[in-house]
Amino acid sequence: MSTSGVPADALQAVRAARRIVIASHIPMDGDGLGTGLALMRALRPSKDAVHLVTPGYVPRVYTFLAGYDEIVKLGGDQPVPDCDLLLALDAGNAERLGRVLTDRPEGARVLNVDHHISNTLYGDVNWVDAAAGATAELGYLLLVELGVEIDAQAAQALLVALVTDTGRFCYSSTRPRTLEIGAALLRLGADPDTLNLHLYRSIPRGVLDLHARAVQRIAFHADGALALLTVEADFGSDLGVDEEDQKDLVDIPVSVEGVVVAGLFRGLKDGGTKVSLRSNSDAADVAAFAAACGGGGHVRAAGYPSAEGPAQTARAALKGLMQMAAAVSPGR
Ligand SMILES: [Mn+2]
C-alpha cells in the first residue's frame, strides 16, 4: 500500500495493461458511469485501447459528460472488446457485472475496484475500500498515483460520480477525504453549476407526474418508522418515463420525517421484483437485511432481487423491516 492508499497490486495491474475494458454494475449509476468515463479519458493516452462497456441501458441524464457517446453498448451476444484487463468499478459481486465478466476475452485479468462492504472479492486483484464515499474516490486516487493527466472533462465526470453517490456530499459515507477530492476536482476544472442544472434542475414533466403518483402510494408502518412503496412494472408507463426514473422513487419515502427505513418494491418487465432499501440510521442495517435475502449493499443503502411480484415480495419483507425500523428511536 502506497501513501496514497492505492494498493501496489492494483497499481501494477493498470500499469501493465495495454488494452483495458472498464465495466460497472448493471444498470450503471452515476458512480460507475462517471468514474468509468473519467478513467477511460485519462488512461487512453498511455494505452492502446480503453473502452467503457455495458450490456445494460445507459442512464440518459449523463449525456452531458464527455465520452458518453463512446460508451460501448453490448447488445445481444456482441463480444466484449479485446483486452488484457477488465477493470470492474463499483460492482459488489460477479453477478452484478453480468456477462461482461463471464464473456471477457481469455486471459484478461480482473481488477475489482469498489467501496461496497459486501464485496465478494471476485477479482484477480481486489481493491475494496468501504470507507470511500464513492468508487470515484478510488478512481481519482488511482489516476493521481499513475501520474496521468486529469483534464476538466475527466474531473467533471468524477465529480458527477462523487455527488450522485454521496447524496450531494450528505450521506454518512461522506468523509473528509471525499470533500478533499471534491475540492481537487474543482481545481482541475469541474463545474458544479453545470452538474446541478443537468442532474437536479432538469426533471422531465413526466417524472414529476410519476413522483406525484408515487407519493399517493407510500404505505407507512411501525408508527411511521417504515415507509414502503410498491409499484408494478407498468407503473408510469403512460408518462414516457423509464427504469431509472422508477429506481429513484425510493428517495421519496426515505425523505419523510420520522422514517427510519424505506423500501421500494419495483416490479420488472420480465417478471420478478427489484427491492431497494434505504436507512436513516446506522442502527438499522439494510445491508444485512438485503444480504439475508440474496442481495447486498451498504448499511444505509442496499437491495436485493426477488422472483416474486412486487406486492408479494413486500408482504414477505414487511415483518422483518417493521422490526428493524421500530427498534430504532425516531430521533435516529
Ligand atoms: Mn458507488
Image: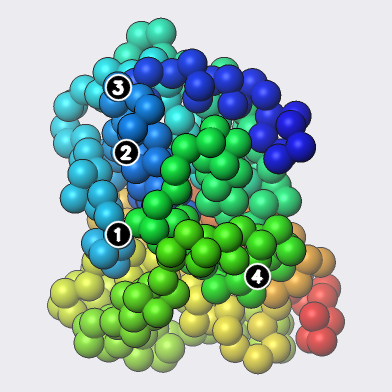
The nearer-to-camera label among 4 and 1 is 1
Which one is earlier in the sequence, the residue at label 4 or at label 3? 3
Can residue 179 be spotted in the picture? yes
Q: Earlier in the sequence, mark 4 or mark 1?
A: 1
From the viewer's side, name the closer residue of 93 and 38. Answer: 38
Q: Earlier in the sequence, mark 1 or mark 3?
A: 3
Q: Which residue is mark 3?
A: 48
Label 4 element class: loop
Q: Which residue, given by chain and number where applicable, does mark 1 sit on?
A: 65
Q: Quadrant of the C terminus?
A: bottom right
Amino acid type at image mark 2: Leu
Drawn side of residue 177 relative to residue 159, left or right: right
Quadrant location, the N terminus = top right
37 above or below 276?
A: above
Q: Which mark is residue 52?
A: 2
Residue under the image location 42 percent in, 25 percent down: 86
The answer to whether 31 appears left or right of 58 in the picture is right
CA distance for labels 4 and 1: 24 Å
Image location of residue 307, percent across then percent down = 42, 47
Residue behind mark 4? 171
